[in-house]
Amino acid sequence: MLVVMTGSSGLIGTALRRVLESAGHEVASLRRGTAQEGGQYDIATRWVASDALTSADAVVHLAGASIGSHRWTAKRRAEIRTSRVDATRLLVDAMARLERRPTVFVAASAIGYYGDTGEGILDESAAPGSGFLAELVQDWEAEARRAEALGVRVVSPRFGIVLSKEGGALPQMVLPFRLGAGGPLGSGRQWMSWVALEDATGALAMLLQDESASGPVNLVAPAPATNRVFAKTLGKVMRRPALAPAPAFALRLVLGKGRTDELLLASQRVEPRRLRELGYTFRHPELEGALRATLHPDAAVSPAPTPI
């Protein structure tokens, strides 16, 4: 199978490429940028190279501007939206022009779809929330779903917090603990839904090939944790104290209100119902084991992976 992938140099894309290539699949990168820059698609000019998708059996769309690395100014919100909603629309429009279309389009999504939901347990049937992230994800998924009218199977993996020491949110969480200042954020009562990188890529590989997989799929482990429990477990794994809470007002002051309230303090207790129905077996279903395998891989032994 030839898989054409955007975001192939990112955290998830790099790991997914290794998984797919080790299983005998071919992966081709779809690079963002103009033709003069060596790119193959450009959102600003609505251009996609004529040969970029012609041989693709599957398209995996992982590219998007970072949500957690900058304050959410009006300019930054526009960049985030363009990199997701407009880019997805561009790729689907390019598929519509093909004589031979890919059989499956896996377009990244996020559990931000659900908004801040407190203690409620969420599966893929839960209603969408409100706020910048929730509305962004709704529009993002709607653009991907347009490919269904072209006869393409569409999967929207809703990522939780992906645990990896190579990037994403975890290194930012680890730093305060290394400095002896780790602890819960705000009240610590908000639920965090996470997934080990190894499971994120294993599930994606399965979703690419399982023809019964379509629509939204929560890419989270089956054991979400409150922020307080997450901090305590991370401290235990790192052998550092977890006693220094970060007050909500201080987080808002440093990071901005929107980014703080929707990313750090929002509560999302998400379960992977669809992955279970599809028969996916998690390598790291529990938080402590996932953190140990991520931060101390040489000391951890992973279960045998699910065949793909």
Image (cartoon, rainbow, N blue to C red):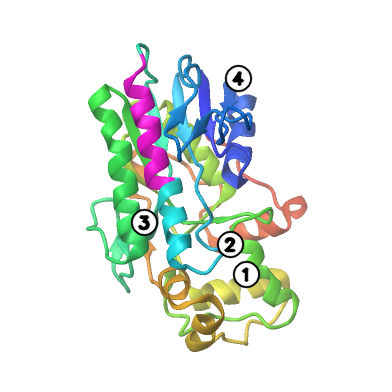
Q: In x, y percent, where is residue 99?
A: 35, 11
- In the picture of the structure, the residue carrying the numbered disc 2 is 169
Residue with the mark numbered 4: 24
Q: Are marks 1 and 4 in contact (CB under 8 Å)?
A: no
C-alpha gap between disc 2 and disc 1: 6 Å
Q: Nearer the viewer, mark 2 or mark 3?
A: 2
189, 168: nearer the viewer: 168
Q: In the image, what residue occupies the spot 45% across and 40% down?
A: 44
Label 3 neighbourhood size at 10 Å, few (<14), some (14-19), many (20+)?
A: many
Looking at the picture, how far across and down is residue 65, in whole percent? Answer: 52, 52
Q: Are marks 2 and 1 in contact (CB under 8 Å)?
A: yes
The Cα–Cα distance between marks 1 and 4, rounded to whole angstroms, is 35 Å
Considering depth in this image, is 235 or 258 the residue closer to the camera?
Answer: 258
| 55 lies above or below 237 | above
Magenta segment: does it hold 85?
Answer: yes
In the image, is 181 to the left or to the right of 88? right
x, y percentage for residue 290? 60, 57
Q: Is residue 135 magenta?
A: no
Q: Is residue 278 above or below residue 28?
A: below
Residue type (three-letter) at the residue carrying disc 3 = Glu
Residue corresponding to mark 1 = 173
Look at the numbered disc 1 and give the secondary structure of its residue: helix
Q: Are marks 2 and 3 in contact (CB under 8 Å)?
A: no
Q: Quadrant of residue 115?
A: bottom left
Q: Which residues are magenta?
A: 84-98
Q: Give how far apart the Cα atoms at labels 2 and 3 are.
A: 20 Å
Q: Residue at x 47, y 67 (%)?
A: 72
Q: Identify the amino acid type marked 2.
A: Ala
- The earlier-in-sequence mark between 2 and 3 is 2
Say which element carries label 2: loop
